[in-house]
Image (tube, coloured by chain):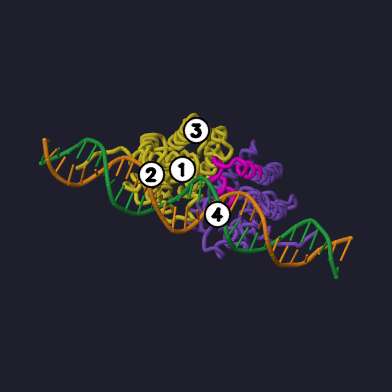
Chain colours: A purple, B yellow, C green, D orange
Amino acid sequence: MGRTSTAKDRLIDAMIELIWAGSYGSTSVDHICDRAGVKKGSFYHFFESKTELALTAIEHGWTEHRKELDQIFSPVVPPLERIMHCFRNFRQEQEDLFKKHGRVLGCPIHSLGAEVSTVDERLRDKLQEILSQFIRYYESAIRDAQAQGSIVTHDAMALARIVFAYSEGLLLHARMWNDLGRLDEFESGAKIILGVKG
Amino acid sequence: MGRTSTAKDRLIDAMIELIWAGSYGSTSVDHICDRAGVKKGSFYHFFESKTELALTAIEHGWTEHRKELDQIFSPVVPPLERIMHCFRNFRQEQEDLFKKHGRVLGCPIHSLGAEVSTVDERLRDKLQEILSQFIRYYESAIRDAQAQGSIVTHDAMALARIVFAYSEGLLLHARMWNDLGRLDEFESGAKIILGVKG
DNA sequence: TGGGAAGTTGACCAGTTGGTTAATTTGAAA
DNA sequence: TTTCAAATTAACCAACTGGTCAACTTCCCA
């Protein structure tokens, strides 16, 4: 079997951190290796290319995040509460990152998407796939809310897309202004969009 | 006085195009020079650094864009029509870019902001400034709509921010999916957010 | 206990990065 | 027509880019 190693995971973690804190372009293979405590030779032992590691890292991050989302969006929870809880979760996550990095980092999928979608189609496809999955959480919650009568809409999907676009926009602003306060509007904004009072 | 030259403008145009079509990271000084038909020595004759050119280019692009916005958001136009017209204008602009580049490019300020805001603070500040100015168009239109009674809200600024975040999110999706169709929702989405029927 | 698969290492590569320089050409204005 | 400030050019730089490789070490498992 040969020896075992944690280098692969360390590389994945380093990649996620560096892209999130900076950008894809600002994250060089050397930086990744330094951060992970891995020599470049080992890097290319585990990954074919930088793009390949990015792909793996994104996939890995999403798989982790989905676990949380599946709990937050559990059908057991009242539909609108799911969405509000999700937003509160975003805010908490950004707060934790702020404590660690001294910066609001926003959503890595979107920041990365904005950067690479015209440049690297394999990354773009992967990011698309993740976002397509993400929006389904909103979609089904909104559909449930509609069925339950807590909101009124004739097009749950359209509403989900608005909420989604809105949340991304807000996260991006929080990153650009390095201001957690921007995320306070999350819930009130969602209520306005969904037409809920309170 | 010495000789005159258009090289500076050509560099600015090339920078805007390349960043918009790709990213800041994917846009090298050599690429810019090639595109502009300018030698690197001349580049550094006109600009201190790549960042300096980016700053100038962004400023220049915004100055141009503002001319259009000032017309679209003229107080003479009914307030909600201003916003709808602005969105139709976005869509038209993206359509033109699509014809030219074969890609939906989205909003360069946001794509760039997502990429560089944690990395280059001078660029970040400039982008912040532009976005802060932009949102004022929405803000005053919404305030006018409120005064005029065509919408009901107790916080025009908050509503403006929602519309703004939403529009950015949508533009980013259009870029990521390379799909102009995503921009069709612009007006209907804004109407839902603003609580207008139709 | 030892064989061998798996992980590690550092030296190496060619191409690109942002940026510099000194010499040269140009053309607007006096 | 001269002048000289401004523009152009090509050659150059060190640092860094993503990526390769052959030799070497480790340690799981039979």
Query: Which quarter of the figure is the C terminus of chain B placed in?
Result: top right
The number of numbered discs placed on residues in the rendered structure image is 4
Magenta span contains residue B103: no
Give yes or no for contact between labels 2 and 1 (Cβ–Cβ under 8 Å): yes
Give yes or no for contact between labels 3 and 4 (Cβ–Cβ under 8 Å): no
Q: Is residue C4 above or below residue B151?
A: below
Residue B190, given in percent of the width and then of the height, sits at 52, 39
What is the chain letter for disc 4?
A
Residue type beneath disc 3? His
Over which residues does the magenta segment extend? Answer: A105-129
* Disc 3, SS: helix
* Residue under pointer 2: B57
* Residue under pointer 1: B19
* Residue under pointer 3: B101
Residue type beneath disc 1? Ile
Query: Which quarter of the figure is the N terminus of chain B placed in?
Result: top left
From the image, give the main secondary structure of the stretch colored magenta. Answer: helix
Residue type beneath disc 4? Ser
* Residue under pointer 4: A28
